[in-house]
Amino acid sequence: MNGKATTTRSRLDRGRSALGPALELVHTGRAPTRAVLTAELGVTRATAGAVAAELEALGLIRVDSRPGAAAGSQGRPSHRLTVDEKGPVALAAQIHADGFRAALVGLGGRVVATAPGCVTVSADPAQVLGAVVEAGAGLLRDSGRRCVGAGLAVPSAVAEPEGTALNPLHLAWPAGAPVRDVFAELVREAGIEGPAFTGNDVNLAALAEHRHGAGRGAQHLLCVATGHRGVGGALVLDGRLHTGSSGLALEVGHLTVNPEGRPCYCGSRGCLDVEADPLAFLSAAGRAPGPEVSLLQQSRDLLRDQAADPAVRAATEQLVDRLGLGLAGLVNILNPDRIILGGLHRELLAAAPERLRAVVADRSLWGRSGGVPILGCTLDHNSLAGAAELAWQPVLDDPLAALGRLAA
Ligand SMILES: [Zn+2]
Protein backbone atom coordinates (compact mmCIF):
# COMPACT_ATOMS: atom_id res chain seq x y z
CA MET A 1 0.00 0.00 0.00
CA ASN A 2 1.49 3.35 -0.95
CA GLY A 3 1.59 6.35 1.35
CA LYS A 4 -1.36 8.14 -0.22
CA ALA A 5 -3.64 5.09 0.10
CA THR A 6 -2.61 4.69 3.75
CA THR A 7 -3.47 8.33 4.42
CA THR A 8 -6.86 8.00 2.71
CA ARG A 9 -7.62 4.78 4.59
CA SER A 10 -6.72 6.21 8.00
CA ARG A 11 -8.77 9.33 7.29
CA LEU A 12 -11.78 7.11 6.47
CA ASP A 13 -11.21 5.05 9.63
CA ARG A 14 -10.94 8.21 11.68
CA GLY A 15 -14.11 9.53 10.09
CA ARG A 16 -15.96 6.29 10.76
CA SER A 17 -14.82 6.06 14.36
CA ALA A 18 -15.99 9.68 14.87
CA LEU A 19 -19.55 8.94 13.64
CA GLY A 20 -20.76 7.53 16.97
CA PRO A 21 -19.23 10.27 19.16
CA ALA A 22 -20.52 12.92 16.72
CA LEU A 23 -24.03 11.48 16.81
CA GLU A 24 -23.98 11.38 20.61
CA LEU A 25 -22.93 15.06 20.71
CA VAL A 26 -25.86 16.08 18.49
CA HIS A 27 -28.24 13.67 20.28
CA THR A 28 -27.45 15.21 23.69
CA GLY A 29 -27.51 18.79 22.41
CA ARG A 30 -23.82 19.36 23.12
CA ALA A 31 -22.95 20.11 19.48
CA PRO A 32 -25.54 22.60 18.16
CA THR A 33 -23.23 23.70 15.32
CA ARG A 34 -20.59 22.18 13.07
CA ALA A 35 -17.98 24.50 14.63
CA VAL A 36 -18.71 23.12 18.11
CA LEU A 37 -18.69 19.58 16.71
CA THR A 38 -15.24 20.21 15.18
CA ALA A 39 -13.90 21.47 18.50
CA GLU A 40 -15.51 18.71 20.59
CA LEU A 41 -14.24 15.91 18.33
CA GLY A 42 -10.78 17.44 18.02
CA VAL A 43 -10.70 16.85 14.26
CA THR A 44 -10.24 19.09 11.23
CA ARG A 45 -13.15 21.10 9.81
CA ALA A 46 -13.06 18.86 6.73
CA THR A 47 -13.39 15.68 8.82
CA ALA A 48 -16.21 17.15 10.94
CA GLY A 49 -17.98 18.25 7.76
CA ALA A 50 -17.67 14.75 6.27
CA VAL A 51 -18.90 13.13 9.49
CA ALA A 52 -21.92 15.44 9.69
CA ALA A 53 -22.71 14.79 6.01
CA GLU A 54 -22.54 11.02 6.56
CA LEU A 55 -24.89 11.22 9.56
CA GLU A 56 -27.25 13.31 7.45
CA ALA A 57 -27.09 10.74 4.64
CA LEU A 58 -28.03 8.06 7.18
CA GLY A 59 -31.17 10.06 7.97
CA LEU A 60 -30.11 10.72 11.57
CA ILE A 61 -29.31 14.46 11.66
CA ARG A 62 -29.95 17.62 9.65
CA VAL A 63 -27.21 20.02 8.64
CA ASP A 64 -28.63 23.52 8.15
CA SER A 65 -26.31 25.90 6.29
CA ARG A 66 -28.74 28.82 5.99
CA PRO A 67 -27.27 32.19 6.92
CA GLY A 68 -28.43 33.34 10.32
CA ALA A 69 -27.86 29.94 11.90
CA ALA A 70 -26.25 30.04 15.35
CA ALA A 71 -22.76 31.56 15.37
CA GLY A 72 -19.75 29.26 15.51
CA SER A 73 -16.82 29.46 17.89
CA GLN A 74 -14.92 31.79 15.53
CA GLY A 75 -17.77 34.29 15.61
CA ARG A 76 -18.79 33.54 12.04
CA PRO A 77 -21.96 31.64 11.15
CA SER A 78 -21.59 27.87 11.35
CA HIS A 79 -23.82 25.13 9.98
CA ARG A 80 -26.48 24.29 12.53
CA LEU A 81 -26.85 20.62 13.54
CA THR A 82 -30.14 19.11 14.73
CA VAL A 83 -31.53 15.60 14.97
CA ASP A 84 -33.64 14.65 11.95
CA GLU A 85 -37.23 15.01 13.15
CA LYS A 86 -38.38 12.57 10.46
CA GLY A 87 -35.63 10.03 11.24
CA PRO A 88 -35.91 6.59 12.82
CA VAL A 89 -37.42 6.01 16.26
CA ALA A 90 -37.00 3.59 19.15
CA LEU A 91 -40.00 1.80 20.62
CA ALA A 92 -40.14 2.45 24.36
CA ALA A 93 -42.39 0.61 26.81
CA GLN A 94 -43.05 1.13 30.51
CA ILE A 95 -44.95 -1.08 32.95
CA HIS A 96 -46.33 0.33 36.21
CA ALA A 97 -48.77 -0.83 38.85
CA ASP A 98 -51.78 0.65 37.00
CA GLY A 99 -50.89 -0.50 33.49
CA PHE A 100 -48.47 0.50 30.77
CA ARG A 101 -47.38 3.17 28.31
CA ALA A 102 -45.88 2.68 24.85
CA ALA A 103 -44.03 5.45 23.04
CA LEU A 104 -41.95 6.20 19.97
CA VAL A 105 -38.83 8.18 20.86
CA GLY A 106 -36.56 9.82 18.31
CA LEU A 107 -32.99 11.02 18.71
CA GLY A 108 -32.65 13.87 21.19
CA GLY A 109 -35.00 12.04 23.58
CA ARG A 110 -37.99 13.43 21.69
CA VAL A 111 -41.21 11.57 22.43
CA VAL A 112 -42.95 11.41 19.04
CA ALA A 113 -46.11 9.53 20.04
CA THR A 114 -47.43 7.72 23.11
CA ALA A 115 -50.23 5.30 23.90
CA PRO A 116 -51.20 4.70 27.54
CA GLY A 117 -53.05 1.61 28.69
CA CYS A 118 -54.89 1.03 31.93
CA VAL A 119 -54.97 -2.68 32.83
CA THR A 120 -54.75 -4.91 35.87
CA VAL A 121 -51.29 -6.46 35.63
CA SER A 122 -51.71 -10.24 35.99
CA ALA A 123 -49.12 -12.74 37.26
CA ASP A 124 -48.14 -13.65 33.68
CA PRO A 125 -45.74 -10.98 32.34
CA ALA A 126 -46.66 -11.95 28.77
CA GLN A 127 -50.14 -10.45 29.31
CA VAL A 128 -49.22 -6.79 29.95
CA LEU A 129 -46.06 -7.01 27.80
CA GLY A 130 -48.16 -8.34 24.91
CA ALA A 131 -50.52 -5.39 25.34
CA VAL A 132 -47.74 -2.77 25.40
CA VAL A 133 -45.94 -4.30 22.39
CA GLU A 134 -49.21 -4.35 20.45
CA ALA A 135 -49.79 -0.67 21.32
CA GLY A 136 -46.23 0.14 20.23
CA ALA A 137 -46.59 -1.77 16.96
CA GLY A 138 -49.73 0.27 16.29
CA LEU A 139 -47.84 3.54 16.87
CA LEU A 140 -45.08 2.36 14.51
CA ARG A 141 -47.58 1.45 11.79
CA ASP A 142 -49.32 4.83 12.09
CA SER A 143 -46.03 6.75 11.99
CA GLY A 144 -44.47 4.84 9.09
CA ARG A 145 -41.06 5.41 10.75
CA ARG A 146 -38.14 3.01 10.79
CA CYS A 147 -37.51 1.37 14.20
CA VAL A 148 -33.98 0.95 15.60
CA GLY A 149 -35.00 -1.35 18.47
CA ALA A 150 -37.10 -1.58 21.61
CA GLY A 151 -36.53 -0.80 25.30
CA LEU A 152 -38.64 -1.72 28.33
CA ALA A 153 -38.73 -0.04 31.78
CA VAL A 154 -40.03 -2.10 34.71
CA PRO A 155 -40.63 -1.20 38.40
CA SER A 156 -38.21 -3.85 39.64
CA ALA A 157 -34.49 -4.47 39.93
CA VAL A 158 -33.42 -6.34 36.78
CA ALA A 159 -30.73 -8.98 37.36
CA GLU A 160 -27.87 -9.17 34.87
CA PRO A 161 -27.09 -11.02 32.74
CA GLU A 162 -30.35 -12.99 33.06
CA GLY A 163 -32.74 -10.07 32.50
CA THR A 164 -35.11 -11.23 35.24
CA ALA A 165 -37.32 -8.97 37.40
CA LEU A 166 -36.16 -9.80 40.94
CA ASN A 167 -38.56 -7.78 43.10
CA PRO A 168 -41.64 -6.65 41.14
CA LEU A 169 -43.33 -5.94 44.45
CA HIS A 170 -46.23 -3.81 43.36
CA LEU A 171 -47.03 -6.00 40.37
CA ALA A 172 -48.42 -9.55 40.53
CA TRP A 173 -45.41 -10.94 38.60
CA PRO A 174 -43.53 -13.71 40.39
CA ALA A 175 -40.02 -12.77 41.62
CA GLY A 176 -37.49 -13.72 38.97
CA ALA A 177 -39.92 -13.40 36.03
CA PRO A 178 -37.86 -13.58 32.78
CA VAL A 179 -39.14 -10.22 31.52
CA ARG A 180 -36.37 -9.45 29.04
CA ASP A 181 -36.76 -12.77 27.19
CA VAL A 182 -40.56 -12.46 27.16
CA PHE A 183 -40.38 -8.85 25.89
CA ALA A 184 -37.77 -9.70 23.21
CA GLU A 185 -39.86 -12.62 21.95
CA LEU A 186 -43.02 -10.49 21.73
CA VAL A 187 -41.12 -7.72 19.90
CA ARG A 188 -39.82 -10.30 17.38
CA GLU A 189 -43.28 -11.85 16.91
CA ALA A 190 -44.73 -8.39 16.23
CA GLY A 191 -42.22 -7.97 13.37
CA ILE A 192 -40.56 -4.96 15.05
CA GLU A 193 -37.00 -4.37 13.82
CA GLY A 194 -33.91 -4.23 16.00
CA PRO A 195 -32.75 -5.63 19.35
CA ALA A 196 -34.81 -5.49 22.57
CA PHE A 197 -33.58 -4.35 26.01
CA THR A 198 -34.98 -4.16 29.56
CA GLY A 199 -34.00 -2.08 32.61
CA ASN A 200 -35.18 -0.76 35.95
CA ASP A 201 -37.43 2.30 35.57
CA VAL A 202 -35.48 4.62 37.92
CA ASN A 203 -32.15 3.60 36.35
CA LEU A 204 -33.59 4.48 32.94
CA ALA A 205 -35.07 7.77 34.19
CA ALA A 206 -31.61 8.75 35.49
CA LEU A 207 -29.97 7.85 32.17
CA ALA A 208 -32.47 9.98 30.22
CA GLU A 209 -32.14 12.93 32.64
CA HIS A 210 -28.35 12.72 32.34
CA ARG A 211 -28.48 12.92 28.54
CA HIS A 212 -31.38 15.30 28.01
CA GLY A 213 -32.63 16.75 31.31
CA ALA A 214 -31.69 17.95 34.81
CA GLY A 215 -28.60 15.72 34.99
CA ARG A 216 -26.77 17.08 31.93
CA GLY A 217 -23.11 17.73 32.62
CA ALA A 218 -23.01 15.94 36.00
CA GLN A 219 -20.11 13.50 36.47
CA HIS A 220 -21.53 11.60 39.46
CA LEU A 221 -25.29 11.93 39.18
CA LEU A 222 -27.50 10.48 41.92
CA CYS A 223 -31.22 10.10 41.14
CA VAL A 224 -33.84 9.21 43.76
CA ALA A 225 -37.50 8.91 42.84
CA THR A 226 -40.88 7.54 43.86
CA GLY A 227 -43.73 7.25 41.39
CA HIS A 228 -46.27 4.92 42.93
CA ARG A 229 -45.09 2.60 45.70
CA GLY A 230 -41.55 2.25 47.03
CA VAL A 231 -38.45 4.37 46.39
CA GLY A 232 -35.82 3.79 43.70
CA GLY A 233 -32.30 5.11 43.17
CA ALA A 234 -29.76 5.26 40.37
CA LEU A 235 -26.22 6.50 39.80
CA VAL A 236 -24.82 7.68 36.46
CA LEU A 237 -21.00 7.71 36.53
CA ASP A 238 -19.21 9.47 33.68
CA GLY A 239 -22.22 9.02 31.43
CA ARG A 240 -22.87 5.34 32.15
CA LEU A 241 -25.31 3.73 34.57
CA HIS A 242 -23.63 2.15 37.58
CA THR A 243 -25.56 -1.11 37.91
CA GLY A 244 -23.27 -3.14 40.21
CA SER A 245 -21.88 -6.63 39.62
CA SER A 246 -25.26 -8.17 38.74
CA GLY A 247 -27.51 -5.22 37.93
CA LEU A 248 -28.75 -4.66 41.47
CA ALA A 249 -26.85 -1.59 42.75
CA LEU A 250 -28.52 1.50 44.27
CA GLU A 251 -31.37 -0.34 46.00
CA VAL A 252 -31.76 2.82 48.11
CA GLY A 253 -35.30 2.05 49.27
CA HIS A 254 -34.09 0.01 52.24
CA LEU A 255 -32.02 2.68 53.96
CA THR A 256 -33.43 3.06 57.48
CA VAL A 257 -34.71 6.61 57.99
CA ASN A 258 -37.05 6.00 60.96
CA PRO A 259 -35.89 3.13 63.22
CA GLU A 260 -39.28 2.86 64.96
CA GLY A 261 -41.20 3.26 61.71
CA ARG A 262 -43.52 1.09 59.66
CA PRO A 263 -42.63 -2.53 58.93
CA CYS A 264 -41.14 -3.04 55.48
CA TYR A 265 -41.56 -6.12 53.30
CA CYS A 266 -37.75 -6.58 53.45
CA GLY A 267 -38.08 -7.59 57.11
CA SER A 268 -36.75 -4.31 58.55
CA ARG A 269 -38.68 -1.23 59.74
CA GLY A 270 -38.72 2.42 58.77
CA CYS A 271 -37.09 1.99 55.35
CA LEU A 272 -37.16 4.91 52.89
CA ASP A 273 -39.37 2.66 50.74
CA VAL A 274 -42.25 2.75 53.24
CA GLU A 275 -41.51 6.16 54.83
CA ALA A 276 -41.15 8.42 51.78
CA ASP A 277 -43.46 7.17 49.02
CA PRO A 278 -46.91 8.52 48.06
CA LEU A 279 -48.72 6.03 50.30
CA ALA A 280 -46.61 7.18 53.29
CA PHE A 281 -47.45 10.81 52.48
CA LEU A 282 -51.20 10.18 52.28
CA SER A 283 -51.09 8.19 55.54
CA ALA A 284 -49.02 10.87 57.33
CA ALA A 285 -51.63 13.46 56.31
CA GLY A 286 -54.42 11.23 57.68
CA ARG A 287 -55.91 10.55 54.24
CA ALA A 288 -57.14 7.14 53.08
CA PRO A 289 -55.97 6.52 49.50
CA GLY A 290 -58.82 6.31 47.00
CA PRO A 291 -58.92 4.04 43.96
CA GLU A 292 -59.89 6.67 41.39
CA VAL A 293 -56.47 8.13 40.43
CA SER A 294 -52.87 7.08 41.06
CA LEU A 295 -51.32 7.50 44.52
CA LEU A 296 -48.88 10.00 43.00
CA GLN A 297 -51.72 12.14 41.62
CA GLN A 298 -53.57 12.03 44.95
CA SER A 299 -50.35 13.14 46.69
CA ARG A 300 -49.86 16.00 44.21
CA ASP A 301 -53.42 17.17 44.74
CA LEU A 302 -52.91 17.08 48.50
CA LEU A 303 -49.59 18.97 48.36
CA ARG A 304 -51.44 21.92 46.81
CA ASP A 305 -53.38 22.24 50.07
CA GLN A 306 -50.35 22.37 52.32
CA ALA A 307 -50.48 26.14 52.91
CA ALA A 308 -54.08 25.92 54.12
CA ASP A 309 -54.06 22.59 55.96
CA PRO A 310 -51.75 22.12 59.00
CA ALA A 311 -52.00 18.30 58.78
CA VAL A 312 -50.77 18.37 55.16
CA ARG A 313 -48.00 20.82 56.13
CA ALA A 314 -46.87 18.48 58.95
CA ALA A 315 -46.95 15.46 56.61
CA THR A 316 -44.90 17.36 54.03
CA GLU A 317 -42.26 18.25 56.64
CA GLN A 318 -42.16 14.68 57.95
CA LEU A 319 -41.56 13.24 54.47
CA VAL A 320 -39.01 15.94 53.59
CA ASP A 321 -37.07 15.14 56.80
CA ARG A 322 -37.05 11.39 56.10
CA LEU A 323 -36.10 11.84 52.46
CA GLY A 324 -33.35 14.25 53.54
CA LEU A 325 -31.97 11.71 56.01
CA GLY A 326 -31.81 9.07 53.27
CA LEU A 327 -30.14 11.48 50.83
CA ALA A 328 -27.59 12.50 53.48
CA GLY A 329 -26.51 8.86 53.91
CA LEU A 330 -26.17 8.49 50.15
CA VAL A 331 -24.15 11.71 49.89
CA ASN A 332 -21.64 10.39 52.44
CA ILE A 333 -21.23 7.09 50.61
CA LEU A 334 -21.37 8.17 46.97
CA ASN A 335 -20.12 11.80 46.98
CA PRO A 336 -22.32 12.82 44.02
CA ASP A 337 -21.85 16.20 42.31
CA ARG A 338 -25.60 16.52 41.70
CA ILE A 339 -28.81 14.95 43.06
CA ILE A 340 -31.99 14.87 41.00
CA LEU A 341 -35.37 13.91 42.40
CA GLY A 342 -38.33 12.40 40.54
CA GLY A 343 -42.03 11.77 41.11
CA LEU A 344 -43.30 12.80 44.57
CA HIS A 345 -39.75 13.64 45.69
CA ARG A 346 -39.58 16.37 43.05
CA GLU A 347 -42.85 17.78 44.39
CA LEU A 348 -41.54 17.67 47.97
CA LEU A 349 -38.42 19.58 46.88
CA ALA A 350 -40.60 22.20 45.19
CA ALA A 351 -42.80 22.47 48.31
CA ALA A 352 -39.96 22.82 50.86
CA PRO A 353 -36.61 23.40 49.08
CA GLU A 354 -34.83 25.13 51.98
CA ARG A 355 -35.87 22.51 54.51
CA LEU A 356 -34.78 19.57 52.32
CA ARG A 357 -31.42 21.16 51.48
CA ALA A 358 -30.84 21.97 55.16
CA VAL A 359 -31.53 18.37 56.30
CA VAL A 360 -29.13 16.97 53.69
CA ALA A 361 -26.46 19.53 54.63
CA ASP A 362 -26.84 19.08 58.40
CA ARG A 363 -26.88 15.28 58.30
CA SER A 364 -24.04 14.61 55.88
CA LEU A 365 -20.32 15.11 56.19
CA TRP A 366 -19.86 16.24 52.59
CA GLY A 367 -23.14 18.13 52.47
CA ARG A 368 -21.87 20.54 55.12
CA SER A 369 -18.67 21.37 53.28
CA GLY A 370 -20.10 23.10 50.25
CA GLY A 371 -23.37 21.34 49.59
CA VAL A 372 -24.57 19.20 46.72
CA PRO A 373 -26.99 20.76 44.21
CA ILE A 374 -30.44 19.13 44.50
CA LEU A 375 -32.75 19.60 41.51
CA GLY A 376 -36.05 18.23 40.25
CA CYS A 377 -36.17 15.98 37.17
CA THR A 378 -37.24 17.97 34.10
CA LEU A 379 -38.29 15.41 31.45
CA ASP A 380 -41.82 14.17 30.90
CA HIS A 381 -41.83 10.37 30.74
CA ASN A 382 -38.16 10.06 31.69
CA SER A 383 -38.31 6.27 32.22
CA LEU A 384 -39.71 5.86 28.70
CA ALA A 385 -37.05 8.18 27.30
CA GLY A 386 -34.43 6.08 29.14
CA ALA A 387 -35.86 2.83 27.77
CA ALA A 388 -35.45 4.35 24.31
CA GLU A 389 -31.81 5.22 25.15
CA LEU A 390 -31.13 1.48 25.58
CA ALA A 391 -32.46 0.87 22.07
CA TRP A 392 -30.54 3.84 20.64
CA GLN A 393 -27.23 2.81 22.24
CA PRO A 394 -26.05 0.44 19.45
CA VAL A 395 -26.70 3.25 16.92
CA LEU A 396 -24.78 5.73 19.09
CA ASP A 397 -21.91 3.23 19.41
CA ASP A 398 -21.60 2.55 15.65
CA PRO A 399 -24.23 4.16 13.40
CA LEU A 400 -23.09 2.46 10.20
CA ALA A 401 -23.06 -1.06 11.61
CA ALA A 402 -26.32 -0.61 13.53
CA LEU A 403 -28.17 0.74 10.52
CA GLY A 404 -26.76 -2.02 8.34
CA ARG A 405 -25.04 0.27 5.89
CA LEU A 406 -21.42 -0.78 6.13
CA ALA A 407 -18.87 1.43 4.36
CA ALA A 408 -17.82 0.25 0.94
ZN1 LIG B 1 -37.06 -2.32 53.61
Image: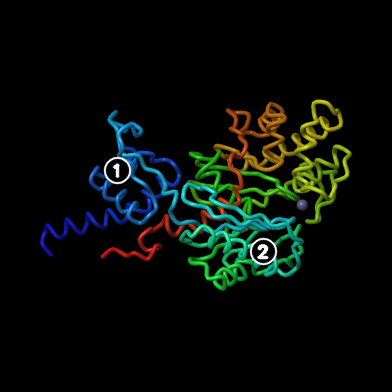
The quarter of the rendered structure image containing the C terminus is bottom left
Residue carrying label 2: 165
In-image side of 56 versus 132 (left or right): left
Q: Secondary structure at mark 1?
A: loop
Q: Residues within 10 Å of mark 2 (few under 14, many from 20)?
A: many
The single residue placed furthest to the front in the displayed view is 142
Q: Is residue 125 left or right of residue 180?
A: right
Instruction: Check disc 1: other Cα within 10 Å, few if <14, some if 14-19, many if 20+.
Output: few
Amino acid identity at mark 2? Ala
> In which quadrant will I find the N terminus?
bottom left
Picture coordinates of residue 370 (x, y %)? 58, 28
Whether residue 47 is visible, yes or no, is yes
Classify 90 as above or below 79.
below
Looking at marks 2 and 1 on the same chain, the residue that comes earlier in the sequence is marked by: 1
Residue nearest the viewer, comparing 77 with 48: 77
Residue 81 image label: none
The residue where tag 1 is placed is: 42
* Tag 1: amino acid: Gly
Count of labels in the image: 2
Residue 406 placement, left or right of 223: left
